[in-house]
Image: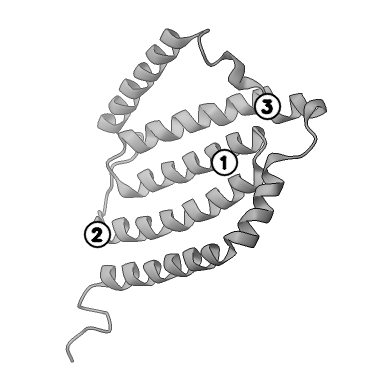
């Protein structure tokens, strides 16, 4: 389980480097999806699978809206790819910074943070997120419905705005 958590953390850092070093919105949005998935995997490993699912769905819903808007505004015929020279140099610079920071903090305050939820199962009586699920649906269920409605409305507004005056319903006949 610790090896899987290391893979999730490594993917999280690599996804953040892709987001930070990419000028193209296409690959930046792809990096954000990877970061979202890896971060939710870290949450699952530490004992919050329902929180991870909710964050993943809400975050990806928001990312679809942002991606649609940014892809419509910055439609390039030949965008910068992660393998091109300036993007690769930025990524190498970020990797060097991450490794220098990791070597500075190696063996420090974060040593106890690698204990995953399956390794302490004999001490747990109740999962932490099961009571949170019941509370969220009983006290905040209406807020989930309102949030879903707002995300859907925002998607339609962004799609209509990004379509422009030439092809939308606002076209002068």
Q: Position of residue 52 (x, y in %)?
A: 59, 45
Q: Residues within 10 Å of mark 2 (few under 14, many from 20)?
A: few
Q: Position of residue 35 (x, y in %)?
A: 47, 39
In the depicted structure, whether residue 158 falls above or below residue 128: below
Which is nearer the N-term, disc 2 or disc 1? 1
Query: Which residue lies at the image location 66% right of the left edge and 22% below the top edge?
Result: 115
Query: Which residue lies at the image location 60% right of the left edge and 49% below the top edge?
Result: 53
In the depicted structure, whether residue 68 falls above or below residue 42: below
Q: Which mark is residue 73?
A: 2
Query: Which residue lies at the image location 55% right of the left edge and 67% below the top edge?
Result: 142
Closer to the camera: disc 2 or disc 1? 1
Which is nearer the N-term, disc 3 or disc 2? 2
Which residue occupies the foreground of this view, 78 or 15?
A: 15
Q: CA gap, disc 2 to disc 1? A: 29 Å
User: In what element is the residue under mark 3?
Assistant: loop
Q: Which mark is residue 124?
A: none
Pointers 3 and 1 in contact (CB under 8 A)?
no
Q: Say which residue label 3 marks.
A: 116
Q: On the rendered structure, is 27 left or right of 130? A: left
Q: Say which residue label 1 marks.
A: 40
Which residue occupies the foreground of this view, 4 or 76?
A: 4
Q: Residue pushed farthest left? A: 172
Which is nearer the N-term, disc 3 or disc 1? 1
């Amino acid at each position: 389980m610790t090896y899987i958590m290391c893979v999730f953390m490594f993917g999280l850092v690599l996804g953040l480097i892709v987001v930070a070093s990419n000028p193209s919105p296409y690959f930046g949005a792809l990096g954000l999806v990877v970061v979202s998935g890896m971060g939710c995997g870290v949450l699952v490993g530490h004992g919050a699978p329902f929180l991870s699912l909710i964050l993943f769905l809400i975050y990806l819903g928001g990312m679809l809206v942002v991606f649609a808007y940014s892809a419509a505004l910055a439609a390039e015929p030949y965008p910068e790819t992660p393998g091109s020279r300036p993007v690769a140099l930025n990524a190498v610079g970020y990797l060097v910074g991450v490794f220098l920071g990791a070597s500075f903090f190696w063996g420090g305050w974060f040593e106890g943070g690698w204990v995953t939820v399956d390794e302490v199962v004999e001490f747990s009586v109740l999962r932490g997120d099961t009571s949170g699920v019941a509370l969220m649906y009983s006290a905040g269920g209406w807020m989930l419905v309102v949030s879903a409605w707002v995300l859907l409305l925002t998607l339609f507004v962004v799609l209509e705005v990004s379509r422009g005056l030439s092809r939308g319903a606002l076209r002068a006949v």
